[in-house]
Amino acid sequence: MDGPKDQSDTLDRMLAAAAAARANAHAPYSNFKVGACLRGDSGRLFAGCNVENAAYPMGQCAEATALGALVAAGDKRVLECAVVAEGGRLTTPCGGCRQRLSEFAGPEIKVHICDPEGPRWSVTLGELLPHSFGREHLER
Ligand code: THU
């Protein structure tokens, strides 16, 4: 188990879950639909989409939606992340979502940046968010 074939099967399932969530995105203001899928420490997958609001700052990113589902279901750690969007450029998680993920993930986890056709770039959270602020900074 957990060989290259299992890993690519898992990524396929993550992409499918993220794409399915993306189809339900509520993005009437930006018309930019995003889906995300997180693999939690239980092995379960949690998907989310962006949920915008007429009061623009109240909108929520797909990663935040997926993270809320993971935490609500009782998982404690994020082991892998996939983000699916479509556009002229690859959609990397926003700064706020990088920070959100870092609360539950180490710098070594893979973040797969995808378009609807598949993964385009796999990067670590540490590469996306170097020198991050974490709970250890609160120790005095
Ligand atoms: N968005 C996400 O959901 N995730 C990202 O990684 C980037 C941006 C959303 C927020 C907003 O609803 C729309 O995309 C345009 O910024």
Image (cartoon, helix red, strand yellow):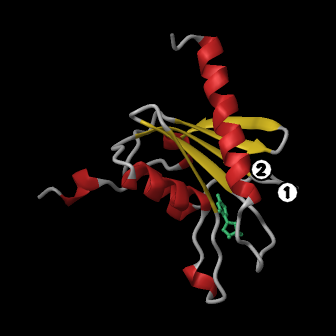
How far across and down, in percent of the image, does residue 9 sit? 66, 22
Q: Residue at x 37, y 41 (%)?
A: 77
Q: Is residue 132 visible?
A: no
Callout 2 secondary element: loop
Left or right of residue 49: residue 73? left
Per the image, the residue denoted by label 1 is 87
Q: Is residue 78 visible?
A: yes
How far across and down, in percent of the image, does residue 1 sit? 51, 10
- Answer with the quarter of the image where residue 117 lies: top right
Per the image, the residue denoted by label 2 is 90
- Answer with the quarter of the image where residue 33 lies: bottom right
* Figure check: 31 above or below 40: below
In front: 38, or 131? Answer: 38
* Figure check: 84 above or below 64: above
How far across and down, in percent of the image, does residue 133 sit? 35, 56
Which numbered disc covers residue 29? none
Determine the quadrant in which ligand 1 lies: bottom right
Q: Characterize the local packing of mark 1: few (<14), some (14-19) or many (20 or more) Cα atoms within 10 angstroms.
A: few
Q: Residue at x 74, y 42 (%)?
A: 114
Q: Amino acid at mark 2?
A: Leu
Callout 1 secondary element: loop
